[in-house]
Image: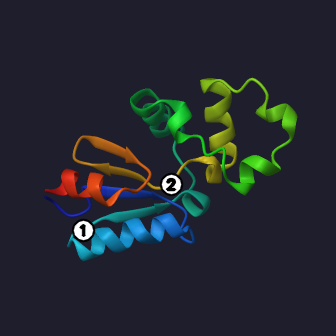
Amino acid sequence: MTEHTVVIYGIKNCDTMKKAMRWLGDAGVSYRFHDYRKDGVDADRLAAWCTSLGWESLLNRRGTTWRNLDDALKQGVDEVRAIALMLQHPALIRRPVLEAFACIEVGFSPDRYAALFS
């Protein structure tokens, strides 16, 4: 594997991100970290993730960012509105999103990561 063929996207202070990055480090996987909050997220990349994974699996409806949104913004969310909201509020994107090889994973599971890197 060439250096930085693995990219992990998320927010640095997120506990799930810390677990995922710790797992990658312990497994000796070289990766590049992309911070949504600091570096933003590319609209085309986000749209591609939605196509691959489904926007529902990417939209984090559990976090404080979602809870703090105006109720009118949350009503009738579809893919177009979800992408617009995630671009405007990157913390609405579930974490982490991992791009490795030709795969995209959302969320952290030691078992899924182990299968991907075995």
Q: Earlier in the sequence, mark 1 or mark 2?
A: 1
Relative depth, front residue between 97 and 110: 110
Quarter occupied by residue 61: top right
Q: Residue at x 54, y 38 (%)?
A: 43
Q: Position of residue 92 (x, y in %)?
A: 64, 48
Task: Out of 45 and 62, give the one closest to the viewer.
Answer: 62
**Image x and y of residue 21, in percent:** 38, 69
Give the quadrant of the N terminus.
Answer: bottom left
Disc 2, SS: loop
Check residue 95 in the rendering and tell me which mark sits there, or answer none. 2
Question: What residue is shown with label 1?
Answer: 30
Q: Is 50 situated left or right of 78 in this image?
A: left
User: Where does residue 41 sit, x and y in percent of width and height?
Assistant: 54, 48
Left or right relative to 91: residue 109: left
- Mark 1 to mark 2: distance in Å? 19 Å
Disc ID at residue 17 = none
Q: Amino acid at mark 2?
A: Arg
Choose top left, top right, bottom left or bottom right for residue 38.
bottom right
Instruction: Identify which amino acid the numbered label 1 is placed on.
Output: Ser
Q: Residue at x 44, y 27 (%)?
A: 51
User: At x 22% / y 67%, what residue is drawn?
Assistant: 29
